[in-house]
Image (cartoon, rainbow, N blue to C red):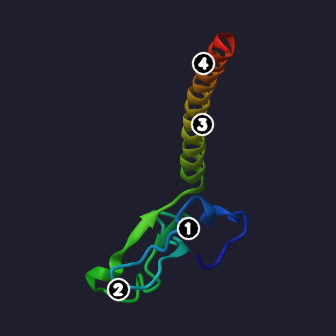
Amino acid sequence: MTGKGKGLKGIDQFYHEDEEVLCGCGLRESRRISRTDGNPNRNFFGCPLFGYKEMEPYDYLSWHDIRVALYKERKRLGDMVANLQLENADLRAKLDRVSKDSAMLAMKN
């Protein structure tokens, strides 16, 4: 992503970290800051040509506020932890079954 402002370091990592998001014009989106009265200092991703051309493909805009980004990242990490806990419980159950099977085989021999 292009340009990181003061206090916004790392914001780009919360969105599109490993993916290249393209506008309808084919250019990669860039992070910008709104300077309008209705959305002062609000972060958004958009076409690098946004505001320069009035054609429909260049009107790509996606708001990304830090609070929203942090909330989504926290939820993503929480979901990941929950999935890992389920996987861990499943692996422990499999290990328990294998241990019991091994003990029974050892008793037979």
In terms of sequence position, does the residue under pointer 3 or pointer 2 come before the other? 2
Question: Residue 81, percent across and down?
Answer: 61, 37
Residue type at numbered disc 1: Asp
Residue type at numbered disc 3: Leu
Residue at image position (38%, 85%) is: 26
For the residue pair 66 and 96, the one nearer the viewer reads as: 96
In the picture of the structure, the residue carrying the numbered disc 4 is 101
**Dot 2 crowding, Cα within 10 Å, few <14, some 14–19, many 20+:** some
Q: CA distance from mark 2 to mark 1?
A: 20 Å
SS at badge 2: loop
Residue type at numbered disc 2: Cys
**Dot 1 crowding, Cα within 10 Å, few <14, some 14–19, many 20+:** few
In this view, 63 is above or below 109: below
Looking at the image, is mark 2 or mark 4 nearer the viewer? 4
Q: CA distance from mark 1 to mark 4?
A: 44 Å
The numbered dot on residue 83 is none
Looking at the image, is mark 4 or mark 3 nearer the viewer? 4
Q: CA distance from mark 4 to mark 3?
A: 26 Å
**Callouts 4 and 3 close, C-beta under 8 Å:** no
Q: CA distance from mark 3 to mark 1?
A: 22 Å
Residue type at numbered disc 4: Asp
In terms of sequence position, does the residue under pointer 3 or pointer 1 come before the other? 1
Question: Residue 50, percent across and down?
Answer: 41, 82
**Callouts 2 and 4 close, C-beta under 8 Å:** no
In the picture of the structure, the residue carrying the numbered disc 1 is 18
Question: Quarter-wise, where is residue 10 in the image?
Answer: bottom right
In terms of sequence position, does the residue under pointer 2 or pointer 1 come before the other? 1
In the picture of the structure, the residue carrying the numbered disc 3 is 84
**Callouts 3 and 2 close, C-beta under 8 Å:** no
In the picture of the structure, the residue carrying the numbered disc 2 is 25
Judged left or right of residue 96, residue 26 is left
